Amino acid sequence: MAEEFITHSAEETTRWGREFAARLKAPVLVLLSGELGSGKTTLAKGIVSGLGAAAEEEVTSPTFTLVHVYGREAKVYHADLYRIESQADFETLGLEEVFAAPAVVILEWPERFAPRTEWPQVRLRLEHLGGDARRITVLSGE
């Protein structure tokens, strides 16, 4: 069963992410889907900060670096698969290695190449609703 939430600003999307982080327990794979500019990285900022792994201002888009790692003991990995063109590109990210120890792994554009894992998954879909409004749909366990 899906849950839907509407946010009306980037700040509200980040705040929702901080609150949502309380529902996450490692190991878990968080899959963020949505069009370009729909707020995936903004939501990730809230999730990462809500988990206590980094301050919101430290969380940036992994579009060009592809993978960011936050936290000291409890790791949070934030990856962007938008520019991944092939299975070989995906394998060079080394994401399989992150599944060696419990962590929270946040993937933007998971429809490109989602890793194979037995970890629980939470799928979040973001949609533009006009202006700064976004619909966040939570689809757990898909």
Image: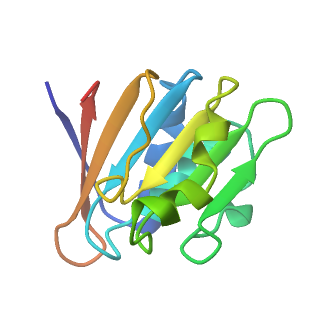
Q: Quadrant of residue 18?
A: top right
The reply to whether residue 42 is visible in this rendering is no
Q: Quadrant of the C terminus?
A: top left
Residue 65 x/y as whole percent: 65, 72
For this rendering, which residue is in front, 139 or 19?
139
What residue appears at the point 31 percent right and 69 percent down from the top-left corner? 38
Residue 72 x/y as whole percent: 86, 38
What residue appears at the point 43 percent right and 21 percent down from the top-left corner? 118
- Residue found farthest to the right: 72
Is 112 above or below relative to 119? below
Is 101 above or below relative to 125? above
What residue appears at the point 59 percent right and 67 percent down from the top-left corner? 66
What residue appears at the point 38 percent right and 45 percent down from the top-left corner? 31
- Residue found farthest to the front: 88
Residue 91 x/y as whole percent: 54, 55
Residue 14 x/y as whole percent: 50, 55
Is 22 above or below relative to 19? above
For this rendering, which residue is in front, 1 or 82?
82
Q: Quadrant of residue 117?
A: top left
Is 45 above or below relative to 24? below
Q: Quadrant of residue 51?
A: top right
The reply to whether residue 100 is visible in this rendering is yes
